[in-house]
Amino acid sequence: MAAMDLLGRRWALRVLWELRAGPTGARSLLAKCEGLSSSVLYERLRDLADAALVVQVDNGGYELTELGRELGTSLQPLDAWARRWSNTLDS
Amino acid sequence: MAAMDLLGRRWALRVLWELRAGPTGARSLLAKCEGLSSSVLYERLRDLADAALVVQVDNGGYELTELGRELGTSLQPLDAWARRWSNTLDS
DNA sequence: CTCTCGTGTTTCGGATTACGAAACGTATCG
DNA sequence: CGATACGTTTCGTAATCCGAAACACGAGAG
């Protein structure tokens, strides 16, 4: 499964996750992802760009491509599950 | 997002992915995941077990828990997307 | 019983990757 | 001209991963 090789890399899924909200700057991504270093972020952004899931916009920020948004929506059930799981951890 | 910290680790998602098919042995998982080393596999299996997503069965193999199966089904749209994406790579 | 084969599992040295802070280039605002 | 904010790169250190080897255990065969 080729998609897993890409999404399995550290922070790849998380970065995609954050980009679902819309165009986001690099420094903003770093702020949202606690523990992510800038060097790794740009490496992942290149990975995702090479896979045609992300493109860079005029002002320098990043946003999902059509393909990336499709992946984003198919991540929605995972989002729902993660929220439920997060709640069971509290109790 | 706590789920991302777990699933963001290398091979974590992929191992879960493979376990959706049903109870699977460790050596079988190594065969399915080309490039995965045994040391990392057992580390991930421990991670997933600590998160109550995976349990070890009598004969030594591994299978998803109820929680793990829920996560598995929420991965189904991602599965469908990955297949579509894999096809676009061929053309 | 013993030998063999197929498991799950651990160990460890070398290779790869990630971290984290610093710095560079550029643009904008006062 | 500073000062600030941003995208980006660099680099030494730390963490992680790979990969092969080995160990432990059980099931069958001879």
Image (cartoon, coloured by chain):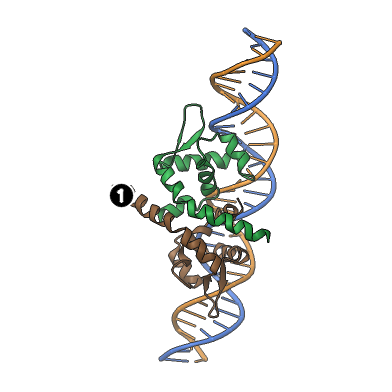
Chain colours: A brown, B green, C blue, D orange
Q: Picture quarter containing residue A56?
A: bottom right
Figure check: A60 above or below A48: below
- Across and down, in percent, residue B20 comes to 50, 42
Question: On the rendered structure, is D25 left or right of A82?
Answer: right
Figure check: C22 above or below B38: below
- Across and down, in percent, residue A35 comes to 47, 59
Seen from the viewer's position, the closer of residues B70 and A58 is: B70
The quadrant of the picture occupied by the C terminus of chain B is bottom right
Residue A38 shows in this picture: no
Q: Picture quarter containing residue D9?
A: bottom right
Q: Chain of mark 1?
A: A
Q: Residue at the left extreme?
A: A91
Q: Which residue is mark 1?
A: A90
Seen from the viewer's position, the closer of residues A39 and B28 is: B28
Q: Residue at x 46, y 66 (%)?
A: A20
Amino acid type indicated by mark 1:
Asp
Q: Classify 10 Å Cα crowding around label 1: few (below 14), some (14-19), many (20 and above).
A: few
Say which element carries label 1: helix
Q: Residue at x 65, y 60 (%)?
A: B89
Seen from the viewer's position, the closer of residues A61 and B39 is: A61
Residue B49 shows in this picture: yes
Q: Picture quarter containing residue A58?
A: bottom right
- Across and down, in percent, residue A85 comes to 36, 50
The quadrant of the picture occupied by the N terminus of chain B is bottom left
Q: How many marks?
A: 1
- Across and down, in percent, residue A55 comes to 57, 71
